[in-house]
Image (cartoon, grey):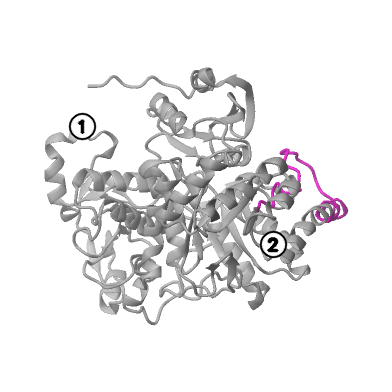
Amino acid sequence: MTSPLLRYCPDLYNYQRRETRPVMVGKVQIGGGAPVVVQSMLTSDTRDAAACVKEALALAEAGCQIVRVTAQTRVIAENLQHIRDGIRAAGCDVPLVADIHFKPDAAMEAVKWVEKVRVNPGNYADKKKFAVKEYTDEEYAAEVAYMEEQFVPLVKECIRLGRAMRIGTNHGSLSDRIMNRWGDTPLGMVESALEFARIARAQGYHNFLFSMKASNPKVMIEAYRLLVAHLNQLGSDWNYPIHLGVTEAGDGEDGRIKSAIGIGSLLADGIGDTVRVSLTEDAIFEIPVAQQLVKPYNEGLPARFERIENVPPVSYDPFDYVRRESQVLTINGIKTGGHETVPVFTTRKKWDAVAHKMDKLGDYKPEVVIEDSGVLEIDPRDDSAIASLNTSAEARLVSIQDGLNLPVIAAFRLLAARIDKKHPILLKDTFQAGGAGDFTENLLTAATNIGSLLCDGIGDAVIVNGEEAPGQSLRISYNILQAAGVRIFKTDYVACPSCGRTLFNLQTTTQKIRAATGHLKGVRIAVMGCIVNGPGEMADADFGYVGGAPGKINLYVGKTAVKFNIPEEEAVERLIDLIKEHDRWFDAPLAA
């Protein structure tokens, strides 16, 4: 277990929002007790002011409260003035954020025209060449000094002009110095951000916030938890707000589920003051997803749950994923528990509804009927039920009974902490019968509740009850298991959202790659519009498709580029050839 001194949340059973200082971005307050703010990022080319103004106004109309736009170079950053002026001329005061990578001079130009600047500590001034070396303390200090020399002028300008800043670490773009000292780890992400924060604080600058983004929800969750725990250790005046996001989440249901697991689980623990959902879709579609994720907290839903009193310590380490140990049970011929595959349960009613087309459900077949499973459903606060279960000689599949007015995540944490480890646990998305909302709401709720628990190693089987449509509830179940990384049953895609840096049409390209490779179960493919996060975020991917220059694609194996400057019209076929070269290709089965 991690040191007990590391605590990111005062109460893992009862909601309590983290208290932060306010950060002002134009007229929008982040943190300091303000509602959680929703933001997004323009996909238009920053050089096209008219297109950027049009897109920003549409986002603001949809409820986006802060708009981010990329500024790749100083010359491009100059156009932020025209974008800002166009938005203000239309009577819209939505704050603008300049997204900066690699170019301190671009940041110095952008800060003149926008209300906030995002800097990435991994590439603002540091090197990123995937070099492996042992840094002496003197070499390490010398690079930090150089970074400080580059960064302090921006900090001073932010102070002079009253600008805000996001110190935004990405798992995919940690510097060589950080990678060699701390590794490609959540702790490395935290240390990278804290270096920049210390420089800012030394200048008397505090109008900033942090982010810790990753494409893997487990990594993202752990990084944010570690960050907050370290901020708590540093002292009460390190109470800076937090920007939440899962980077390169992808599109469709997969992108929404992955975002909900990462963002939703942290919001449920009281962490997060502003969110951006990153989808490989038009930015306008990110807004309703983000609004739905923050809605329960902005509307005070946690206060309506019963408090859980007299709580034991949780059964897992919040900073280190390990699947909870349990005995293996065979239920209706399906193994559950231990380190077995996590099966998908359904109700008798839903099973009967799809029984006539079971052969057409493909990878989304139900595996166990809950009414036939012998599951024991209890109130985790019931001392007598817990005592009876723990004195039984045989392992039982256990879940939580419906109808309880408890938060799902906290209730299952309590169950896992109180029952003997030998008993496997069946996770539910809700304790209320029937879906309370529309499909997207049900999907996001299920992903938040079940996905969060799976990322903490809790759960040996899952059932989605909140979505009444049988086929959709099964699809949600499987896609949550995939996004949480506990059951890989189809091709996995890491796809970044479009932005002004993107060198090809991400949406159509991603769909083209899906169509060609969607049958490659267990293969992970990254589709990246540019190199900002590409190589790093692809460390977990088997193959990568990355924009290298306009109309040109580079192909990667892991985080190593192996094919360069391929014409875009040939690149998907060349990707297939690369997969074949590494013996990961097989032909798609013929349609029945």
The segment highlighted magenta reads 119-145
Q: Which mark is residue 34?
A: none
- For disc 1, the marked residue is 360
Which quarter of the image is occupied by the N terminus?
bottom right
Q: Is residue 325 visible?
A: no
Q: Which mark is residue 194?
A: 2
For this rendering, which residue is in front, 571 or 367? 571
Residue 140: % across, % down: 82, 53
Q: Is residue 526 positioned above or below 428 on the image?
A: above
Q: Amino acid type of disc 1? A: Lys
Disc 2 versus disc 1: nearer the observer: 2
Q: Which badge, 2 or 1, is on the more N-terminal residue? A: 2
For this rendering, which residue is in front, 105 or 554? 105
Residue 144: % across, % down: 81, 55
Predominant secondary structure, magenta span: loop
Q: Secondary structure at mark 2?
A: helix
Q: Is residue 473 positioned above or below 241 on the image?
A: above
For this rendering, which residue is in front, 161 or 493? 161
Q: Secondary structure at mark 1?
A: helix
Give the Cα distance between marks 2 and 1.
52 Å
